[in-house]
Every structure is written in C-alpha cells, then in structure tokens.
C-alpha cells in the first residue's frame, strides 16, 4: 500500500458515518436584509464601489455611447478594445471611429498580439453579468467573445452594467442567476480598480492591472 493509500484509508476510517443536517442558508439570508427597490440597490452599489475608487456614470440606452465618448476624451484616450461579437461592441465599432477613435477587436489568439495587448491597449469595454449592492462588486463572466484579459490588462477598464441586474447580496445573485446550473471557467468579482497593500498596511490603488475602473450604469430611460 502506498503512502497515499494509507492516508486515504485513515481519513475514510475517521469519517463520520452520518452527515449532519445542512444549514438553511436561504432562510438566513431571507431575514438578513430587507427587500430593496431597484433604485435603492443601484444607489447602494454606487456608494460602495465609489468608495473603492471606481468612477460611475448613470446612463441609458440613448446616451451611453455619448457618455463613453466623453469619458475617453476626458482621459485623453483615443483608442479602445471592444468585442465585435457583442451588441455593445458592435455599437462602439459603428459610432466611435467616425469621431476619431481607434477601435481594436479581440479577434485572434493572444500569442499573436501579446505585445500590442500589454503595451498599446489603453482601455477596454466589457459588459457585467450582474452586480452586488452590499459590497459594490461587479460580476463578470468571461467567455470567447470577451476573454478575461480584456478586463485584467488595459489600464482603463470600462464596464457596461444594467442596473436591473444589481442584487442585494452575493447569495441573491447566485440564486437568481442560477449559478447551481453551471459556471464559466472564470467568474470575476471586481470591486474597484486594482489595489495592493504592503507590510505596513498601506493600501495603494492602480498597482497592477487596471488602474482605473469606470462603470456605465445603464438605467431605464426617463420615459
């Protein structure tokens, strides 16, 4: 018998014969926080993610592209990485080039343009799947259309978020979004731009990865 087999045998012998009752997590969360309206959740999400040095703009279907243009101009950026396989990426590809912006697309393997990605891509636009009001956290599900590097490498990361997909808690988000039915290879939880802390407990923002996080929070039109 190998050492591995001996260790596993001891673990199996010491394992309890019956499993105790599982905690009722759903019932606990049902009383943990009172229900909130969509506008209340959006307000709380914005408060907490701005505390983490993110920049938030309230937009709607009719003006999010013009807001994106203003954000890029104010930051002195004339280039952005988008996906041509998403609705919002196609909208940017249609609207921004005539205004003097260069729009890159993630249309080849990273090995073919790694240097350009890491050294000449100042900003990117991706969509959030959802968000968590309690912690001011964005939930991203990277896929073939918007790979993970789009949100991890460019110095400025711009995220399009539908306000109606902001949930009270992480538990509510997982339940409502059906996470038990399947997860992506990577699920990203983003609360502000990149940050790190040294041994003296000094928190520094923009240490690695995106130095700025901009959220375009898509709300319903006033009409």
Image: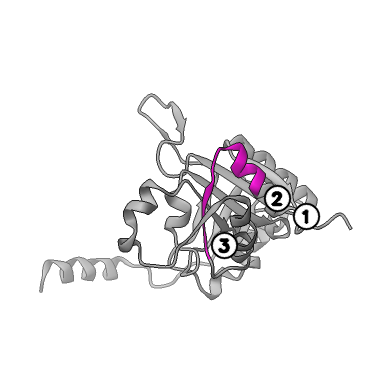
- Which one is nearer the viewer's eye here, 119 or 32? 119
Instruction: State which mark lies toward you, 2 or 1.
Output: 2
Q: Is residue 75 magenta?
A: yes
Q: Position of residue 220 (x, y in %)?
A: 80, 58
Query: At numbered mark 2, what does the secondary structure look like: helix, strand or loop?
Result: helix
- Badge 1 or badge 3: first in the primary sequence: 3
Q: Quadrant of residue 98 in the image?
A: bottom right
Q: Is residue 207 above or below residue 113?
A: above
- For the point 30% across and 62% down, the residue is 111
Structural distance between the alpha carbons of marks 2 and 3: 49 Å
- Badge 2 or badge 1: first in the primary sequence: 1
Q: Position of residue 143 (x, y in %)?
A: 48, 68
Image quarter in which the C terminus is found = bottom right
For label 2, the residue is 66
Q: Dot 3: few (<14), some (14–19), or many (≥20) neighbours within 10 Å? A: few
Structural distance between the alpha carbons of marks 1 and 3: 29 Å
Q: Is residue 149 magenta?
A: no
Q: Is residue 208 left or right of residue 58?
A: left
Instruction: State which mark lies toward you, 1 or 3.
Output: 1
Q: Quadrant of residue 2 in the image?
A: bottom left
Residue 210 in sight in this render = yes
For label 3, the residue is 23
Query: In the rendered structure, are the residues bearing label 1 and label 3 in contact, judged by CB atoms less than 8 Å apart?
Result: no
Query: At numbered mark 1, what does the secondary structure look like: helix, strand or loop?
Result: helix
What residue range appears in magenta? 69-83
Q: Position of residue 120 (x, y in %)?
A: 40, 48
Image quarter in which the N terminus is found = bottom left
- For the point 54% across and 70% down, the residue is 85
Q: Which mark is residue 38?
A: 1
Residue 35 in sight in this render = no
């Amino acid at each position: 018998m190998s050492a591995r087999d001996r260790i596993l045998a001891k673990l199996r012998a010491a394992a309890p014969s019956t499993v105790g009752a599982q905690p009722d997590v759903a019932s606990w969360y049902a009383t943990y926080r009172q229900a909130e309206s969509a506008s209340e959740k959006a307000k709380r999400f914005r408060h907490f993610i701005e505390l983490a040095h993110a920049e938030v703009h309230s937009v709607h279907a009719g003006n999010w592209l013009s807001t994106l243009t203003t954000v890029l101009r104010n930051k002195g950026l004339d280039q952005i990485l988008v996906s041509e396989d998403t609705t919002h990426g196609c909208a940017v590809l249609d609207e921004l080039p005539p205004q003097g912006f260069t729009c890159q697309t993630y249309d080849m393997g990273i090995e073919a343009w790694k240097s350009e990605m890491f050294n000449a891509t100042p900003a990117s636009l991706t969509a959030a799947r959802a968000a968590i009001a309690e912690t001011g956290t964005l939930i991203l599900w990277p896929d073939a259309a918007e790979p993970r590097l789009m949100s991890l490498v460019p110095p400025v990361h711009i995220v399009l978020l539908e306000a109606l997909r902001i949930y009270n808690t992480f538990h509510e988000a997982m339940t409502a979004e059906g996470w038990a039915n399947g997860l992506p290879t990577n699920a990203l939880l983003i609360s502000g731009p990149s940050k790190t802390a040294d041994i003296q407990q000094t928190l520094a923002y923009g240490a690695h990865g995106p130095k700025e996080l901009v959220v375009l929070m898509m709300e319903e039109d006033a009409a």
